[in-house]
Amino acid sequence: MIVLPGKRGFELLSRASPVRVHVLRDLDTTPLLPWKVSSGGEVELPEWLVEVLEREGLVARVEERAISDLDRAIHKEGSLTRPARIGGDFYSWLSREIRRAMEDPTLHPADKRRVLDRAREFAIRRLAKIVRYALLSQEAGDVGQRVLSRLTLHERVIYHHLRAIISRWISEVLAEEGGSDG
């Protein structure tokens, strides 16, 4: 049986997702950072490491987003046949924004609902494309790195699980039908 990661698994994926940061002070090599990065440079690091380095004032996220970026992402997703390129930390950011909106006592309940609805709309648009590519891969083989490179770590896990589920189902159906002929 193929099982998607649970809440903890998705949290771990979020913590491993790459985040682009601007280096504020020289970073020497450590067991956590096996290469030296000079001040003023930009680099992608996993979310968990960015959180540590941010607290120390060593890095700043390059791409700080606003909730209005969600509307732009939805529009872009609707206008492309392939998944749009979004940052590897998009879902982590979106989750934080939803939490922030829900906990904001000054935000009108209708605005809170709108944030949730827009986030759901974005996720459904992305998932529809992932499902389509998982199905397409059954006919044309793997969809290739071009499409997979546009997916976040979370989405790649979903894509590979869906692909395996669909492939197994097709194999079982064909085996069943093949067995009844002979």
Image (cartoon, rainbow, N blue to C red):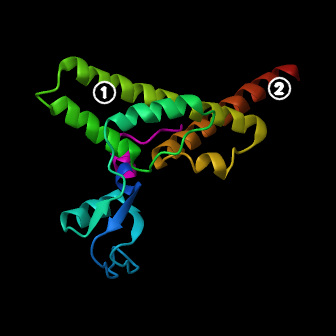
Q: In the figure, 143 relative to 99: above or below? A: below
Q: Tell me the residue at 68%/49% (across/down).
A: 144
- Residue that mark 1 sits on: 115
- Residue that mark 2 sits on: 178
Q: In the figure, 40 relative to 139: above or below? A: below
Comparing 131 with 76, the one in front is: 76
Q: CA distance from mark 2 to mark 1?
A: 49 Å
Magenta segment: 1-13
Amino acid type, label 2: Gly
Q: Tell me the residue at 51%/45% (across/down).
A: 157
Quarter of the image for residue 131 reads top right
Q: Tell me the residue at 20%/29% (across/down).
A: 102
Comparing 176 with 52, the one in front is: 52
Percent coordinates x, y for residue 179 in the rendering? 81, 25
Percent coordinates x, y for residue 15 in the rendering? 34, 54
* Residue 104 included in the magenta stretch of the image: no
Counting residues from the start of the chain, the first of labels 2 and 1 encountered is 1
